[in-house]
Image (cartoon, rainbow, N blue to C red):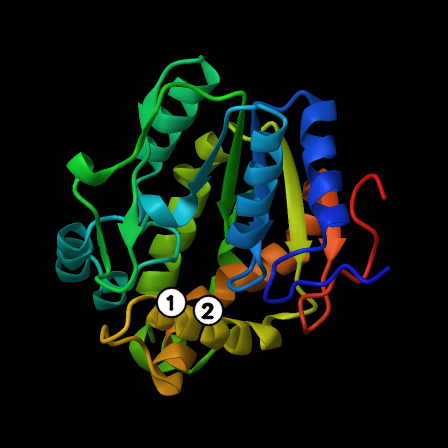
Amino acid sequence: MATGLHTGGFDARIVSAVLDDALASGARVYGISGLQGSGKSTLAAQVADAAGRQRLRCVVLSLDDVYLPSAERLRLARDVHPLLTTRGPPGTHEVELATEVLDALRAGHGAALPRFDKLADDRLPPADWPRVDGADLVLFEGWCLGTPAEAPAALEAPLNALERDEDGDGCWRRWCNQALQDAYPALWRRIDRLLLLQAPGFEVVPGWRRQAERALAASRPGTPGMDDAAIDRFVQHYERTSRQALRTLPRIADRVVALDAQRRPALPAPGC
């Protein structure tokens, strides 16, 4: 079954199966989880288009769009740990904002959808957020959706060069893990059904991230993006929680689509 991710996105059979799964389950909020570069936003956009052709009001919200603004991350970097300047790890999202938006849409109300500019590394002002009047289906996608916190003992040894050289005492990783334990479960509970795009391993993430960064830079010519060295350092911020997701989410997710290193689904999609 040739159903890989390519320049045109996922095969139509995958998209149809995911939409069917969302509708058959009765989910108001359908989560799509997967590591960086796994195709979450591509799949969500394709499913939303398919839903629109069925005259359904489908809204896409990304966990990335509720990253804390740059000024707030700089405050955390000053008050807690310098590594909190970098967006992405647990504790660098405004979880309350995401829950407010999802709750409003679930209740049938309108909502303004936050948006984050990754090249500018800052959230757009609220005046620039698109507004929707309501939704029949909300697709909520994010790189760590549903991931539980690690046990404290697992945090003792550094996992990579970033943790060894810049978090030698473990302050940053303990702070992020505590945020994952305390703040995020309330957001995960807003997800009625969770689909996991399961990467073959963390080793594919730097390459996937490079592809995503090149596509992002191409969309905004003249705006500088990250080079390969910066990307390699960047993904180390995500490695610990990513490996926890790889270990735990296959048992937590309602549906799992296993991907190979080229992001081709190795198993049939739900309903295929």
The image quadrant that residue 172 belongs to is bottom left
Mark 2 crowd level (few <14, some 14–19, many ≥20, 10 Å Cα): some
Q: Find the distance from the CA under tag 2 to the CA under tag 1.
A: 6 Å
Residue 87's place in the image compared with 139, above or below, is below
Circle count: 2
Residue 19's place in the image compared with 118, above or below, is above
- Residue at position x 40%, y 85% from top? 228
Which label sits on residue 212? Answer: 2
Q: Are marks 2 and 1 in contact (CB under 8 Å)?
A: yes
**Amino acid beneath label 2:** Ala
**Screen quadrant of the N terminus:** bottom right
Q: In the image shown, does 2 or 39 lie closer to the viewer?
A: 2
**Amino acid beneath label 1:** Leu
Residue 217's place in the image compared with 247, above or below, is below
- Residue at position x 77%, y 47% from top? 13
Position in image of residue 144 (x %, y %)? 51, 51
Which label sits on residue 216? Answer: 1
**Screen quadrant of the C terminus:** top right
**In the visual, does 186 lie left or right of 226?**
right
Q: In the image shown, does 156 or 234 lie closer to the viewer?
A: 234
Camera sees residue 157 = no
